[in-house]
Image (cartoon, grey):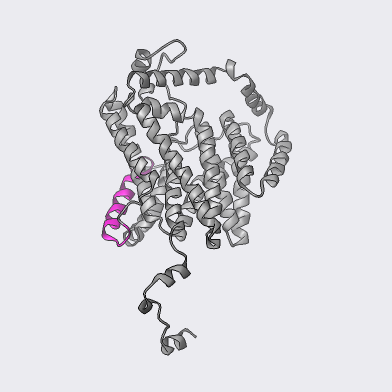
Amino acid sequence: MLLFGLVPMIVRAPFIGVLAWLWVSLMNPNREVHGFLAGAQINLYLAVLTGLAWVASKDRKLIPANPFTILLLIFAGWATLSTYFALDRAHALPIWDRTLKTVVLVLAVTMLADSRVRLQALIWMIAVSLGYYAVKGGVFTLVGGGRNHVFGPESSMIEDNNSLGLALIVLLPLLNYLRLTSAKALARAGLTAAIVLALVAILGTYSRGALITLAAAGATYSARSRNGVLLLLAAALVAMALPSMLPASWFERMSSIQSADRDASFQDRIAAWRTSFNIASAHPLFGGGFVAVEQNWIAEAYSSPGSLRTGRAAHSVYFQVLGDTGFVGLALYLSAVMAAILNTFMVLGAARVRPDLQWASHLARMLQVSIVAFLAGGAALSMAYYDGVLVLFAITAALLHVARQPAEGEQAASEPAWKTSAPTPAVVARSR
């Protein structure tokens, strides 16, 4: 009923289609229900409808000339060539198709999120979509005493407990941004509760990588925020409360971080990294194509001492892109990420001389924390093409575009006199 109700709204305002598209991509609500919608390609229908509405609308039709968007388009083209020359094209095509759809969503965000209101709506949609699993997972952990692992929606990119943990850590700074900028006390209280439950859910994933990433994100937030000391105090209080919240099995799991050199899971990751590097070394330009390392015959063909003998995930953003698209593809991908980070610093520079851009300054700092969390946690997870993170990169480009728009007073001063002339006495009387 909700989806059908969105149709006329999307036809009238394509940006609502982008919000709905983002909601389905991140929350995967069709994975939470039973019946015919569980396997429906809702994203495809929303994308087509949004595209048709956008063509017929008066919304901007040009992609902002931002280094991130340019590099992303070049990377998408390079990934297409990598798929054409893939070691197993039939196996690579489904991932290429999914990734290209994500790129289209990212470009739609950069084009249509052209105001503060729209950017705020995007952040809220991300918060609601992923915050659902934060609240759900936090309550599940508290009620169950932390005895069971928290997982994401089935058949999604965050189904695995480690992937969900990273997604929730990336979400935390955005929740904090909304808490800082929300005018309503009730909204701030709700967001504070969501942050607390998200932290509990992250711990409930039993992901050792998530714990390390959480520490990296906390250190970055302390460095980028004026309330860093308060965060450290809050972290100390949470650490003291952990024994009463989580069972001994959780502490045993986390203590194994100290013996990573003897941990079978960590050794498997190193083996996957070596195989991905071997594939890229043999095919430096285009790599082996998407998820080549997951094919048994490819892992066997490109094996070396200490590498994989059977196919499995790359278990690293960097080695994933390297094995999929070669050294050139990895350079393009990392350049796009660096361009997104540069966008945030340019926003901070603009905000220093514009008091009206303090909200943009807060958002840029929180985006920096999210990106650092992704770069740290992604070192051990195959989430290079996760739509939630790529949309965050897109938001940096849209934010810079909005920050460069003149303030209301400056815009009025630059308009011709006939556009800024004083209203007639009749208009003044009616306004009173």
Residue 383 figure quarter? top left
Q: State left or right for residue 83 relative to residue 224.
A: left
Q: State left or right for residue 135 relative to residue 314.
A: right
What stretch of residues is rendered in magenta? 37-60
Farthest residue, direction top:
305
Q: State left or right for residue 315 relative to residue 329.
A: right
Q: Residue at x 59, y 28 (%)?
A: 208
- Please say whether residue 390 is visible from this viewpoint: yes
Q: State left or right for residue 103 relative to residue 199.
A: left
- Please say whether residue 40 is visible from this viewpoint: no
Q: What type of secondary structure mainly makes up the magenta span?
A: helix
The image shows residue 2 at horizontal and vertical percentages of 40, 55
Residue 282 figure quarter? top left
The image shows residue 333 at horizontal and vertical percentages of 40, 35
> For this rendering, which residue is in front, 283 or 132?
283
Q: Is residue 57 above or below residue 242?
A: below
> For this rendering, which residue is in front, 254 or 428?
428
> For this rendering, which residue is in front, 129 or 120?
120
Q: Is residue 82 above or below residue 185?
A: above
The image shows residue 364 at horizontal and vertical percentages of 52, 50
The image shows residue 203 at horizontal and vertical percentages of 61, 35
Residue 247 figure quarter? top right
- Quarter holding the N terminus? bottom left
Q: Is residue 426 above or below residue 103?
A: below
The number of numbered discs placed on residues in the rendered structure image is 0
Is 371 one of the magenta-colored residues? no
Q: Residue at x 54, y 17 (%)?
A: 264
Is 48 one of the magenta-colored residues? yes
